[in-house]
């Protein structure tokens, strides 16, 4: 199984160039992204293998755990390789009952950045995304001036290199751009959840990365069956084909599939080498538009 992630190419996050196949750390925390992992040694091994396999873009947040994934990243990888770009997000906190609660006030956002700095063990964070709290997986319009300005102030102080948005709309990106440059957007998008099609293309034209989450989220049983049939024909897994389709969709798409399993990590990274012939791409497109 090939894990040459360079075959998928690179993209830039501000002054950082990263492989388009990255790694998301969310699943390293315990069940429900809360508490420590069942097997901390394996979690550390997954992080180290990701780096050894060429991954240079890790997505995390201090509200994963909370604090768990950042501390694992620090233990596994610090001192960090010079080419590693760590992207985190702020805008929520966890309750004692594992609930996800908004933390959108400027002071709360800035406190979240300091939590990330401390738990990652860094003096500056490569990219901080403002995670907006609309519907759980769907953006809502509304001004983000106060929130984004609070993060831009920390960027001016040198604590953040670059800024991004998560669960955002095009209008919110445009508003944020008037405050400070936006280098990436994280939204739900996959083969069948195609509401951001025009948004992906607009960001591509602006030189902004689009980072989809939940690459298999929202699939109907029929759509899953059709994807599985295509995957079987290619002798790949459905997840690998779904990831490969995203890489083919647009050059500004960066992937951050997460896992706590070394074997699953290898499968995810191998998706960067999958070639999808035109007839297969047409069949996959039909799943998204007709399934």
Image: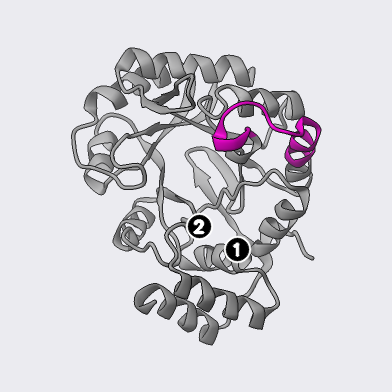
Q: Residue at x 65, y 83 (%)?
A: 233
Number of other residues with Cα within 10 Å of mark 2, as a class: few under 14, some 14 to 19, many 20 or more: many
Is 184 located above or below residue 176 in the figure?
below
Give the percent coordinates (x, y) of residue 261. Answer: 73, 47
Is residue 256 covered in magenta? no
Left or right: 4, with 166 as reference point = right
Report the front residue among 274 and 137: 137
Q: Is the residue marked by circle 1 packed among few (<14), some (14-19), or many (20+) residues within 10 Å?
A: some
In this picture, residue 100 sits left or right of residue 254: left
* Distance between the alpha carbons at the discs numbered 1 and 2: 8 Å
> Which residue is rendered at x = 35% and y = 75% of the image?
289
User: Quadrant location of residue 235?
Assistant: bottom right
Q: Quadrant of the N terminus?
A: bottom right
Say which residue appears at 36% left-offset and 57% top-offset: 200
What secondary structure is marked by label 2? loop
Give the answer, above or below, for where 38 lies relative to 54: above
Residue 216, percent from left and from top: 50, 59
For image coordinates 53% across by 24% down, the residue present is 62
Residue receiving disc 1 = 239
Residue 47 appears in view: yes
Locate residue 9, reporting x and y percent. Answer: 60, 59
Q: Quadrant of the C terminus?
A: bottom left
Q: Are marks 1 and 2 in contact (CB under 8 Å)?
A: yes
In primary-sequence order, the first of circles 1 and 2 is 2
- The residue that label 2 is drawn on is 215
- Magenta stretch, main secondary structure, is helix
Q: Residue furthest bottom?
A: 279
Name the quadrant containing residue 78.
Answer: top right
Magenta span has 43?
A: yes
> Does residue 187 lie above or below 224 as drawn?
above
Q: Which residues are magenta?
A: 29-48
């Amino acid at each position: 199984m090939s894990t040459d992630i360079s075959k998928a190419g690179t993209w830039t996050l501000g002054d950082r160039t990263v492989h388009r196949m990255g790694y998301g750390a969310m699943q390293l925390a315990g069940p429900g992204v809360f508490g420590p992992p069942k097997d901390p040694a394996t979690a550390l091994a997954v992080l180290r293998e990701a780096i050894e396999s060429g991954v240079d873009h890790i997505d995390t947040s201090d509200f994963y755990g909370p604090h768990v994934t950042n501390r694992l990243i620090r233990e596994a990888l610090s001192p960090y390789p010079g080419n590693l770009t760590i992207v985190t997000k702020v805008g929520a906190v966890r309750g004692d009952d594992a609930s996800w609660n908004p933390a959108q006030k400027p002071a709360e956002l800035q406190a979240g950045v300091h939590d990330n700095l401390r738990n990652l063990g860094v003096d500056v964070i490569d990219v901080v995304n403002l995670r907006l709290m609309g519907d759980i997986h769907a953006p809502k319009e509304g001004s983000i001036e106060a929130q984004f300005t609070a993060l831009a102030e920390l960027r001016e102080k040198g604590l953040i290199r670059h800024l991004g948005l998560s669960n955002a709309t095009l209008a919110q990106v445009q508003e944020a751009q008037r405050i400070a440059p936006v280098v990436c957007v994280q939204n739900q998008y996959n083969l069948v959840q195609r509401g951001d099609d025009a948004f992906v293309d607009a960001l591509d034209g602006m030189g902004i990365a689009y980072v989809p989450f939940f690459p298999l989220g929202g699939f109907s049983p029929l759509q899953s069956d059709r994807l599985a049939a295509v995957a079987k024909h290619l002798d790949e897994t459905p997840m690998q084909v779904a990831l490969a389709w995203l890489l083919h969709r647009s050059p500004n798409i960066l992937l951050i599939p997460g896992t706590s399993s070394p074997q699953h990590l290898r499968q995810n990274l191998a998706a960067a080498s999958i070639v999808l012939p035109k007839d297969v791409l047409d069949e996959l497109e039909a799943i998204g538009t007709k399934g």
